[in-house]
Image (spheres, helix red, strand yellow):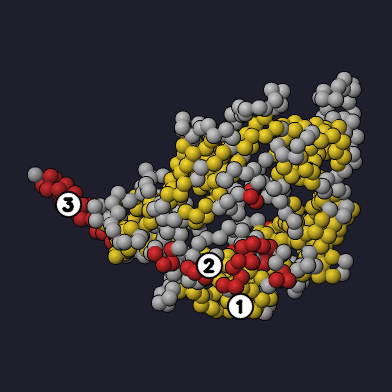
Amino acid sequence: MRPAIAVGCCLLLATVAAAQNASPSRQALCAVSGQVVQEPGGMPIRKVLVSLPKNEGTTTFSSDRDPQSRYATLTDAEGRFRLEGVQAGEYRLSLERNGFVTPTRRSRVYSSTLISLTAGQELTGLLLRMQPAGVVQGKIVDEDGDAMPGVNVIAMSPTTRNGFANAMTNDLGGYRLAGLPRGEYLVLAQSTQEPVVAGAKLDEARVYAPTYYPGTTGHSQASRIQVHPGDEASVSFNLVSTRTFTVRGSVSGLPHRISHRTPQSRTELVSVEPTDSVSLESADNQVAQQFSGVVLPDGRFEITGVLPGSYRTLITDQDGGNWRRLRPGQTIEVRNADLDGVRLVPEPTGELRGHFRMDDGQQMDWSQVSVLIDPDEREETEPALVGNVAKDGLFKVENVPAGSYHAIVTSNSNSEAWRDYISKEVIANGKDVGDSGFSTAGGVTSVDIVVSAKGGSIVGTVVDDKDAPIADVQVVCIPDSSRRKRRDVYQEAQTDPRGHFVLRGLNPGEYQVFALDDPAGDISDPEFVRTHEALGQSVKLDEGARQTISLKVAADGDQP
């Protein structure tokens, strides 16, 4: 019996020891609880999925089935929730419920989405709000007023190509776009069906053009729809049918292409490597429309199926196995007839060569950075021109189209080591063109980039009308008017759970700094700057200076 007793004692001691070892782990876990209510009115909302995805600098989306990366629960009949066993860390609190959206103006109606939990913390009393989603519904018909089933309808941002909701029309032409946050939208309808139009010529190829409400093919003529929480906006309109056209022409100035035989007709394509092509990219439509055709060995091209509109012409040239895009520098109009005899001559491309150095003579490993040649007149479809930098600071960027540019220096890693560095000077022809930019017109352009470790910083706190800190709002820093084309001196940051923010690595100069209720897209967009700069607090920075400020989010009526 003694051995049995000894074994029992050992097991008991082992159990006690395991419990003692596990105790600190249990104590380190956190809990989060609160209530979700409707805004306005304060009525509790049941069956809201409340989850805590890990915060990694931006909102992350992880599987609800992965308990290691996401904690989730549903609210009860009183809208209450409790999440237990949460590891200490930083999280973004997420709410999901059909028919509801989280308010975008978070500082006034929605408790912080960003929470930071310390070991063993129990965060209670959170009051979270959701608004009834807006709806856009209506009917799509053809030009004779007949219902159009199977049409894709999209609610889009008026200023970007982002879509927020889409739906297909039913057999009666009806559609419903649900789950929309409050705001302004464009409604776009697209169909691949072949039009049946009374009186149309049978030998004319016709298609339905992408059509915006109230029945226009042009983005600039589209009407904006205001969507309010819980409201239904009625939007019905007809699709526009149109003929398609052919654009023919020739390209000169490309490297000579050798073919083993001559094409027998104008449209016959001969297998030749490498292959060049001409593209027409929409200049007056938010929808990314592009039509292309190959360039034959003698320079001729033909592009079919082109919709009416204004188009930028681009040439893609495969030179030595590397694709490059050449801008012919002209826009063509396609309206009500085929175009013949279009002549395209690519603008000359050049080469940018340069060298990096520190302002204090310090030796650096410059292979950790890259240089981006940023065009002042940039199109979304144009690729970035990036130059790799050698360890000794030498760099080269090839195939640079003629135009005006600014040089932007970026780090090749997420390391904090370069956060306070700035491009102090960009020297071309003995002149600092860092702010003004420089031009190229073919040939070789030489620039020297002088870097300094003495970037300035702006730190502070964002508070509400009662001086309480506001977490997880966007802070934007835009430069004075003389530097608006220099995109590397714009900065943005998010406030942490204590409402703090840090803007680092700023060049000397004047800035406007402001906090936004609603997140912004491209903060360097001239329209965004024009409508927001008056909201800013002016800050002047000297080299290496650190300024501390306090910001308040503008009242609802102050923001566009």
Residue placed most toward the observer, 244 or 356? 244
Q: Is residue 428 above or below residue 312?
A: below
SS for callout 2:
loop
Q: Amino acid at mark 3?
A: Leu
The mark nearer the N terminus, 2 or 3, is: 3
Q: Looking at this view, is 102 or 28 the one in front?
A: 102
User: How far is mark 2 from mark 3, CA to CA?
Assistant: 67 Å
Q: Is residue 148 left or right of residue 65?
A: right
Q: Residue at x 82, y 23 (%)?
A: 268
> Relative to 107, is 386 above or below?
above
Tell me how many marks there are.
Answer: 3
User: Would residue 357 be found to the left or right of residue 299 on screen?
Assistant: left
Q: Quadrant of residue 38?
A: bottom left
User: SS for tag 1?
Assistant: strand
Residue 245, x across and y down, in percent: 75, 33
Q: Residues within 10 Å of mark 1 (few under 14, many from 20)?
A: some
Q: Residue furthest left?
A: 1
Q: Is residue 193 above or below residue 398?
A: above
Q: Which percent across, then down, holds residue 475?
A: 54, 67
The residue tagged 3 is 12
Report the amino acid beneath label 1.
Ser
Determine the residue positioned at 55% across, 53% down: 224
Name which residue lies at 57% across and 46% down: 214
User: Which of disc 2 and disc 1 is earlier in sequence?
Assistant: 1
User: For the residues carrying marks 1 and 3, which lies nearer the camera in this image?
Assistant: 1
Q: Nearer the viewer, residue 93 or 466?
A: 466
Residue 294, x across and y down, in percent: 79, 32
Give residue 538's mark. 1
Quadrant of the image containing the N terminus: top left
| Labelled disc at residue 559 | 2
